[in-house]
Amino acid sequence: MAAKYKDVADENESKVLGLKTGIADLNTKLDEIEGGLSRLRIDLQSCCRSRVELEATISRMISEAFSSNLTPELTKNYVLKPELENFESTLMESVGSIRQEMLELIKTSIGKEKFESRLEELLRREGLNKTTGLGEREVALIVENALIQYDADKTGLFDFALETAGGSVISTRCTETYVQKSAMYSVFGIPIWYPSNNPRTIIQPGVQPGECWAFKGSSGYIVIQLSEPIHPTQFSLEHISSSMSPSGKIDSAPRDFIVYGLQGEKDENPVELGEYTYLDNSTPLQFFPVQHPSDLSFPYIELDIKTNYGNINYTCLYRFRVHGNR
């Protein structure tokens, strides 16, 4: 029993010695820290007393940094004022050329007569004179005006078929909507809705892949009531480009189609306004002027799709617009 107590006492003594050694090490480290703090206080006091010298030293270092020794290095990355002025002159010449190209582009897209009419109206409103030539301000106004109109609906023309403006789809004749279950909306894994676009899609904004009305086969009909009776002047048909298609093809795009003007939903004597072909290798948004103008105004327009580009299952209509005069 005595031997057992002796072993326990030895073990406790060993632990006490270890603790004393640890405490001694901590005291040594504390002494070092206090010495460092003392030195830091001295340095800070010295720094504050020599603030003027410090500012002078910093100024001298900055002057040396921008001395002639640094000039060659700076010229590698920066330009001198004469070079900047030459660049500005060249840039203004390029801007002038770009302005002219934009004017020609705008003139081509909306027609020369309409361009001249809008130009005169714009200059008259701004108190400018066309005979003095088109300066920077005039060009900027024209371009800004054209971009605002384009941004509104990509055409700069009012769409009388647009649903939000009062247009509506009233009939698809006997054309059947093609329904394909693709995207699925579910709650807790239970499918509750398979979205499918209806005929109204073609008179609504938005032309993203899949945002179309798909109908069965390669031919179909749709009758649209316009926001008000008009004299149609042109139509525009829009489809996605082949680059936006996963397969790189748009074989479901409409190809040949006819547009009729109607006095009523079931007009027995529709007036053919034109027969057209949508080109799959051209721009996504294409315009088609009325081929057979009429003195009548039409509250309804019928779009008859005759063929597509080879898809035997369905045809996709993305956006159809009707432009004209009230």
Image (cartoon, rainbow, N blue to C red):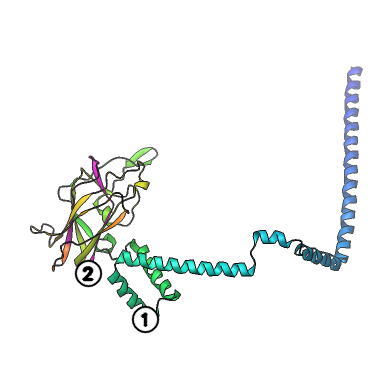
* Residue drawn where x is 56% and y is 66% of the image: 87
- Location of mark 2 (residue): 325
Query: Would you say residue 303 is visible in this rendering?
Result: no
Per the picture, the main secondary structure of the magenta-coloured stretch is strand
- Point out residue 298 in the picture as x, y percentages from the top left corner: 16, 64
**Residue 61 appears left or right of 209:** right
- Which residue is at the front of the view, 202 or 119? 119
Is the C-beta separation of discs 2 and 1 under 8 Å?
A: no
The label shown at residue 131 is 1
Residue in the foreground of this view, choosing between 58 and 38: 58
Q: Residues within 10 Å of mark 1 (few under 14, many from 20)?
A: few
Asked which secondary structure carries label 1, the reply is helix
Q: Nearer the viewer, mark 2 or mark 1?
A: 1
User: Is residue 29 toward the left or the right of residue 288 in the image?
Assistant: right
Quarter of the rendering occupied by the C terminus: bottom left
Magenta highlight range: 300-326
Q: Which residue: 45% across, 69% down? A: 96
> Is residue 308 shown in magenta?
yes
Q: Crowding at label 2, few (<14), some or many (≥20) Cα neighbours within 10 Å?
A: few
Quarter holding the N terminus is: top right
Name the image quarter holding residue 285.
bottom left
The residue type indicated by label 2 comes to Asn
